[in-house]
């Protein structure tokens, strides 16, 4: 498979971020840094702002205030360039029910300009190679989530933004996802994940959203 190597990147740094939705401040003065090879796990109650942070980092919500840099460059200067370096997975799996499992992943790979040679290995890594020719409308929730996560394996990008990536996954799938994430971090990738699942990965940092009632810093 096509593997990235981002060990020499400077990482992702946020300083004094403020997020607003419909005129309401979700969080403010949020600062953190994630170095190559690190996982930042977001934890806290529902509605605390974890999903909003991930959407903001992905460029899906506007940055009301603050600075976000990646490899030393200000992301606000060229959001599209930063978006080409990241994967974002939300609560919903973007699966086309009329396409087969393999066709869905092929669509994503072609859209990203990645190698089609990585499709079958990615399906195998997530444990769904055996259903590659099954239309996605027949998949269970867990199988749809595995297919969505197969994008991470098939398309090498240094920054992963993951919103509840283990929802609907069984223990086998969680183990496969943890292994996939460990491989990504070993190559110098960055992952920021809102998840209640302990993946048992080294170099994991915690950003606790229960502390965001006051200016928050989780810098390292």
Image (cartoon, helix red, strand yellow):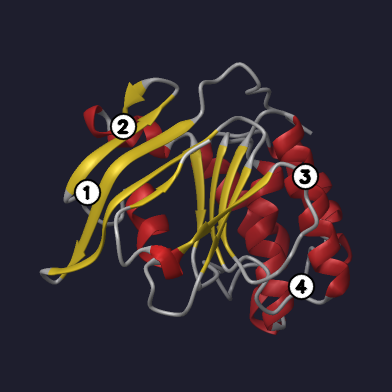
- Residue matched to label 4: 134
Residue 28 falls in image quadrant: bottom left
Q: Residue at x 67, y 27 (%)?
A: 4
Residue 212 is labelled as none
Q: Nearer the viewer, residue 60 or 213?
A: 213
Cα separation, mark 2 vs mark 3, equals 27 Å
**Which tag is nearer the camera, tag 4 or tag 3?**
3
Residue 184, compared with residue 55, is above or below; it is: above
Cα separation, mark 4 vs mark 1, equals 41 Å
Q: Residues within 10 Å of mark 4 (few under 14, many from 20)?
A: some
- Residue matched to label 1: 63
Residue 74, compared with residue 64, is above or below; it is: above
Cα separation, mark 4 vs mark 3, equals 36 Å
Q: Which mark sits nearer the N-terminus, 2 or 4?
A: 2
Is residue 185 visible to the viewer in this orientation of the structure? yes
Helix, strand, or loop for circle 3? loop
Residue 202 is labelled as 3
Cα separation, mark 1 vs mark 3, equals 30 Å
Give residue 108's position: percent from left, percent from top: 56, 50
Helix, strand, or loop for circle 4? loop
Q: Residues within 10 Å of mark 1 (few under 14, many from 20)?
A: some
Is residue 135 visible to the viewer in this orientation of the structure? no
Q: Say if mark 2 contacts mark 4, CB within 8 Å.
A: no
Cα separation, mark 2 vs mark 4, equals 40 Å
**Which tag is nearer the camera, tag 2 or tag 3?**
3
**Which tag is nearer the camera, tag 4 or tag 1?**
1
**Which tag is nearer the camera, tag 2 or tag 4?**
2
Give residue 122's position: percent from left, percent from top: 77, 48
Q: Nearer the viewer, residue 159 or 3?
A: 159
Q: Say if mark 4 contacts mark 1, CB within 8 Å.
A: no
- Residue matched to label 2: 75
Q: Residues within 10 Å of mark 2 (few under 14, many from 20)?
A: many
């Amino acid at each position: 498979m096509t593997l990235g190597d981002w060990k020499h990147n400077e990482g992702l740094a946020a300083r004094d971020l403020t997020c607003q939705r419909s005129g309401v401040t979700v969080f403010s003065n949020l600062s953190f840094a994630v170095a190559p090879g690190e996982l930042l796990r977001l934890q806290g109650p529902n509605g605390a702002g974890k999903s909003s942070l991930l959407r903001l980092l992905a460029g899906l919500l506007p940055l009301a205030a603050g600075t976000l840099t990646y490899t030393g460059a200000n992301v606000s200067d060229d959001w599209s360039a930063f978006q080409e370096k990241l994967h974002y997975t939300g609560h919903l799996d973007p699966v086309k029910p009329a396409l087969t499992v393999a066709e869905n992943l092929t669509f994503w790979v072609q859209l990203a300009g990645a190698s089609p040679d990585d499709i079958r290995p990615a399906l195998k890594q997530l444990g769904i190679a055996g259903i590659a020719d099954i239309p996605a409308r027949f998949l269970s929730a867990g199988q749809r989530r595995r297919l969505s996560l197969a994008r991470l394996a098939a398309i090498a990008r240094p920054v992963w933004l993951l919103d509840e990536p283990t929802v609907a996954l069984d223990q086998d799938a969680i183990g496969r996802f943890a292994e996939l994430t460990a491989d990504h971090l070993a190559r110098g990738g960055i992952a920021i994940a809102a998840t209640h699942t302990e993946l048992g990965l080294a170099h994991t940092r915690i950003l606790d959203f229960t502390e965001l009632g006051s200016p928050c810093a989780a810098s390292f």
